[in-house]
Amino acid sequence: MTAPAIRTDQLTKRYGRLLALNGLDLTVDAGEVFGFLGPNGAGKSTTIRLLLGLARPTAGRARIFDVDAGDVAAAHRLLAYVPADVSLWPQLTGAELLDLLAATGPGVDVAYRADLVARFDVDLSRPARTYSTGNRQKVALVAAFATRAPLLVLDEPTSGLDPLMELQFRRAVAEARDNGQTVFLCSHQLAEVEAVCDRVGILRAGRLVDVATVPELRRLHRSEVTARFTGPAPDLAGVPGVDLLDQSDGTLRFTLAGPPGAALRVLAAAEVTALAVREPSLEEIFLDYYGQAAR
Ligand SMILES: Nc1ncnc2c1ncn2[C@@H]1O[C@H](COP(=O)(O)OP(=O)(O)OP(=O)(O)O)[C@@H](O)[C@H]1O
């Protein structure tokens, strides 16, 4: 069996009195696209720094395909990384940068890289000092996706990209997955995570609060139900999991958490003419978690 792309055991990082990461147990399987989410200060960057060997754990350990993350020379042969804030050598042109990054990384597919340069519309002739934030990000993305590194670690990689480039990003992630590469994606762009990730992990205050597929997360959270009816309104007061949003002439809107049986029995007893159930978006699920954090 292939080793997991990432495995952390009780990974912990303290900064003085602050517990930035608290006993993280996380497994990312080889070949999956994993979204790593959480509000500001949750510990995402700290986790990435530990995975990259840029910081040492206070306790616990992190492994990249069974290589200790602290063994930087070995681990970095297995991964490519795109930071949230891309810095490039200002005097080098795009073409020189891609060659330099290719020489330091785990090997590059040059034909695929040329394809990515065209798709991400990178002007290779200009020096990096003239690049905008989005252009710097595009160079770093092209360099990472063009590698055959089994693991791609992407920290907020699309914050500076316009919607067309965002689509190119999603396509490149899908191609990486088709190639058998693993993608660890840290992002606040929840629609992006929803579109590309197989599973997501949610971090809050240094602790992992959930790991699930997006459909699983949806099932655990509130759906919004709209029922149209004739005759007397169905009486949902006191039905477990139901929160009434509003009720007007012939229409009832409520949210539903947990098993729907009890609510459906009440609706079945009324003259319901139409029923629509909307599952929550990842964004709504998140606001639920963030809301709980604030309470
Ligand atoms: N070098 C450091 N020294 C002291 N505290 C730190 C250091 N780095 C991070 N922290 C603290 O650790 C906690 C976790 O920070 P981290 O940067 O990992 O969060 P994050 O989830 O990446 O947040 P964001 O979404 O804002 O990037 C925060 O409270 C932060 O202030």
Image: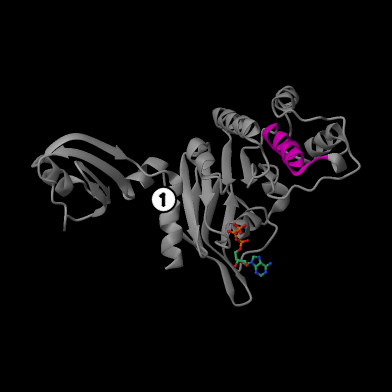
Q: Is residue 145 magenta?
A: yes
Position of 54 relative to 251 (above/below): below
Q: Quadrant of residue 209?
A: bottom left
Q: Position of residue 28 (x, y in %)?
A: 51, 46
State the residue at coordinates (42%, 49%).
284
Which color scheme did the rendering employ for the protein?
A: one colour
Q: Quadrant of ligand 1?
A: bottom right
User: Relative to 44, is 106 above or below?
Assistant: above
- Asked if residue 118 is positioned above or below residue 4 in the image, the reply reads above
Image coordinates for residue 173, horizontal then vertical, percent: 58, 33
Q: Choose between 124 and 206: the one closer to the eye.
A: 124
> Extreme front residue here?
249
Q: Nearer the viewer, residue 58 or 168?
A: 168
Q: Nearer the viewer, residue 206 or 295?
A: 295
Number of other residues with Cα within 10 Å of mark 1, as a class: few under 14, some 14 to 19, many 20 or more = some
6 in the magenta segment:
no
Question: What x and y, as percent, mark residue 215?
Answer: 37, 40
Residue 205 appears in the picture as rendered: yes
Specify start and end residues of the magenta stretch as a single range: 131-146
Residue labelled with disc 1? 285
Whether residue 33 is visible? no
| Residue at figure coordinates x 8%, y 42% from the top left | 269
